[in-house]
Image (cartoon, coloured by chain):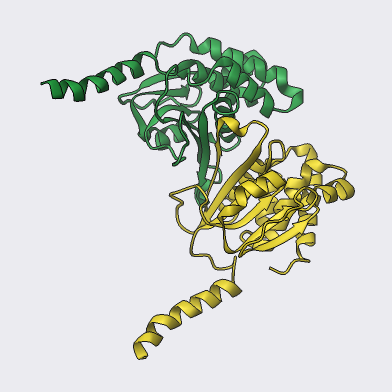
Chain colours: A green, B yellow
């Protein structure tokens, strides 16, 4: 029994730590997927998250997208892997957090969400929310962008703010620096507001 | 001897085909790396090349970048894999064509260029050109952008035009469509001209 204690107790402790301190202590791959349709800024969202985690957050990150000839006009996704160690394989296979901005993207890409993961959907577009062993946060992201900021183009930045708040995988400060480094100078204030709205709106969800 | 003819002739024919029709027939992974420093648009160049090959070129592509905490301010790279088949592993390991916009990026990333590959360097920045079993094309990309277009910001698009002409991995039409779909509407003409300059300047190189 002493041997079994030796073997099993550490994994139990690890499991408890990973549950209670998610986003604070990270000792493994953290996988994210941003999905929607072309023109919704999903690649930019992925790049910003990767740069927040690495350049402004001190971790390692890899960001990727795959395309087929069918990519034109269809569902698209970008992926980010964050780790304390170098990321060897940059594709997501067991997703901790996923964003779906359209029904098609949600249907196509949600299958890889891991047990206990998070799915954030834009409820303006995703009416048929998939069920599974993951938490779903459904919120009208695009209409909030239009109603509160007059620009649906920043829906991706609101979503980034929400997913930052939900996952706590990067700090508010890191994601803000990464957003401001990537958006056009004329729209810094708009994007900063979009991010703040995202942080605020996500606080209503308990994940 | 009949057996050896049977075994060796096909590979000789394949080799000749691959040399004479490079870029026209592709039956394997084609790996590209765009490297420089932050702010030189290397990620955008990678995304445009991947979209030219897939959305406008009918192939499969994967595009990725990796970051470490040291990424701030240092050499950066983005990678594109193009294939007739789905791309499982999106990182470059044996590079067919690489762009280096700075000396630091050139030194850091040229080691993975394969035998017979192509290295395009910006001669404004890369003075110490590495030697190896690959072809080097050295051209003052940034100063041509400044002198002929008045904007060094489009040096990455001139480089994209050059690497398209040198590799013929995508058509002029496909890369132009991909560029125009990704750059701001106010700068379509500037970017179109930058691409054309790239095509023209690269014709001077025999690779």
Q: Residue at x 51, y 28 (%)?
A: A101
Residue A10 sits in quarter: top left
Q: Which residue is more in the foreground, A195 or A3?
A: A3
User: Where's residue B156, x and y in %?
Assistant: 73, 46
- Vertical placement of residue A65 versus A166, above or below: below
Q: Which residue is more in the foreground, A121 or B163?
A: B163
Q: Can residue A126 be seen in the rendering of this structure? A: yes
* Residue B135 left/right relative to A67: right
Q: Can residue B59 be seen in the rendering of this structure? A: no
User: Where's residue A205, x and y in %?
Assistant: 43, 11
State which quarter of the image contains the C terminus of chain B.
bottom right
User: Where's residue B36, x and y in %?
Assistant: 68, 43
Q: Which residue is more in the foreground, B34 or A140?
A: B34
State which quarter of the image contains the N terminus of chain B.
bottom left
Outermost residue to the left: A1
- Vertical placement of residue B60 versus A139, above or below: below
User: Where's residue B174, x and y in %?
Assistant: 65, 55
């Amino acid at each position: 029994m002493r041997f079994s204690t030796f073997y099993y107790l550490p994994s139990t402790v690890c499991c408890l730590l990973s549950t209670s301190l998610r986003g604070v202590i990270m000792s493994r791959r953290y996988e994210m997927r941003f999905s929607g349709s072309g023109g919704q800024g999903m690649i930019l969202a992925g790049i910003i998250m990767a740069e927040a985690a690495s350049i402004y957050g001190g971790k390692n990150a890899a960001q990727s997208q795959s395309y087929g000839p069918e990519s034109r006009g269809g569902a698209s996704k970008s992926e980010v892997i964050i780790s304390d160690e170098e990321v060897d394989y940059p594709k997501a296979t067991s997703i901790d957090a996923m964003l779906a901005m359209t029904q098609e993207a949600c249907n196509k890409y949600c299958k890889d969400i891991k047990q206990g993961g998070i799915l954030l959907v834009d409820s303006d577009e995703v009416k048929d929310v998939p069920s599974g062993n993951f938490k779903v946060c459904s919120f009208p992201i695009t209409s909030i962008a239009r109603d509160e900021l007059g620009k649906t183009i920043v829906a991706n930045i609101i979503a980034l703010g929400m997913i930052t708040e939900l996952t706590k995988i990067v700090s508010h400060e890191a994601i803000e620096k990464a957003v401001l480094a990537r958006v056009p100078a004329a729209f810094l204030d708009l994007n900063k507001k979009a991010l703040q709205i995202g942080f605020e709106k996500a606080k209503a969800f308990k994940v």
